[in-house]
Image: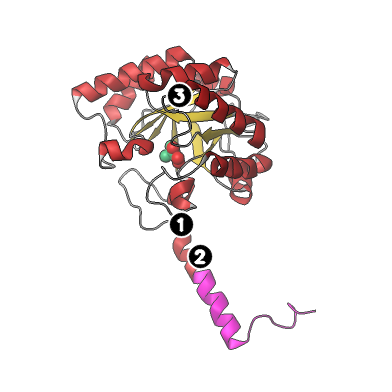
Amino acid sequence: MSSKFSNIRRVTTHQLQAMKIAGEKISMLTAYDYSMAKIIDSAGIDIILVGDSASNVIAGNETTLPITLDHMIYHATSVVKAVKRALVVVDIPFGSYQGNSQEALRSSIRIMKESGAHSVKMEGGIEIKESIDRVLSAGVPVMGHLGLTPQSIYKFGTYTVRAKEKNEANKLIEDAIALEESGCFALVIEKIPAALTKKITEKLTIPIIGIGAGPHADGQVLVMHDMLGINNEFNPRFLRRYAELHSSITNAVEAYISDIKSGSFPNEKESY
Ligand code: KIV
């Protein structure tokens, strides 16, 4: 790791803003447990997202909808214990903020108080502005999430690229401006055309973090299980795999089974 911001002791929303201004890209990755959070924090990641993708990669659900606020607090609490440097953002799960700003405030306060996380993330634009405003007014930093918002998957119908049409692209730009005006400290934009990401990143002063949104965003986020190749059935075009842990783990477990069956594990040195 070598950058102007490598040696900071704690990543804050202000430092993320400074990274955008300095043109330094922001790195973000999901984590859901203590051990993995400890590894990725020590490696120097800037933001750890306790994503509601835990519903998919940890709980095995088809969508992010079933995960509850209690589940998210459990994951966030484990992650926060491990993290020394990164800013920890926690997804407020489906049904815990939409259309009811008091509930959004209650959910955010529970996340911040019970897990010790540093900020929350909510999916949606102008339609959830009241909730965002209310949470921000309590002093809780909010990250927005626009484009393909997985909590609305039954409205979209598919996981295909969003905002390819002019109307949807214009609405996305309006939403992004509204979230910046509300006071969100950053936005995730998911699965939209690269040219639209460029436009939004240049227009907005807050950091824009892309996933499947091309190279022009101020930073990038991926789901940890996808980038480490733990989940080998998910192969979208935007995903770059940095490890093939599915096959590494399979090979290790097969070798372990084989050593037990052959009687070669444990050996004398591994015994008391
Ligand atoms: O839940 C999650 O992992 C996310 C990322 C895809 C940004 O929201």
Front-lying residue, 59 or 194: 59
Q: CA distance from mark 1 to mark 3?
A: 37 Å
Q: Is residue 66 left or right of residue 175?
A: right
Residue 63 makes an appearance in the image: yes
> Relative to 115, is 56 above or below?
below
Q: CA distance from mark 1 to mark 2?
A: 8 Å
Label 3 CB less than 8 angstroms from ligand 1: no
- The residue wearing badge 3 is 100
Question: What amino acid type is highlighted by mark number 2?
Answer: Ile
**Cβ atoms at labels 1 and 2 below 8 Å apart:** yes
**Of marks 1 and 3, which one's residue comes earlier in the chain?**
3
Q: Residue furthest top?
A: 181
Q: Dot 1: within a 10 Å radius of its alpha carbon, few (fewer than 14), some, or many (20 or more) residues?
A: some
Q: Quadrant of the C terminus?
A: bottom right
Question: What amino acid type is highlighted by mark number 1?
Answer: Ile
Q: CA distance from mark 2 to mark 3?
A: 44 Å
Between tags 1 and 3, which lies in front?
3
* Disc assigned to residue 230: 1
* Secondary-structure class at tag 3: loop
- Report the residue at 63% width, 84% height from top: 264
* Secondary-structure class at tag 1: loop
- The residue wearing badge 2 is 249
Label 1 CB less than 8 angstroms from ligand 1: no
Q: Position of residue 143 (x, y in %)?
A: 48, 26
Residues rendered magenta in the picture: 251-272
Which quadrant of the figure has residue 255? bottom right
Identify the colour scheme used: secondary structure
* Secondary-structure class at tag 2: helix
Question: What amino acid type is highlighted by mark number 3?
Answer: Asn
Q: Is residue 93 left or right of residue 2?
A: left
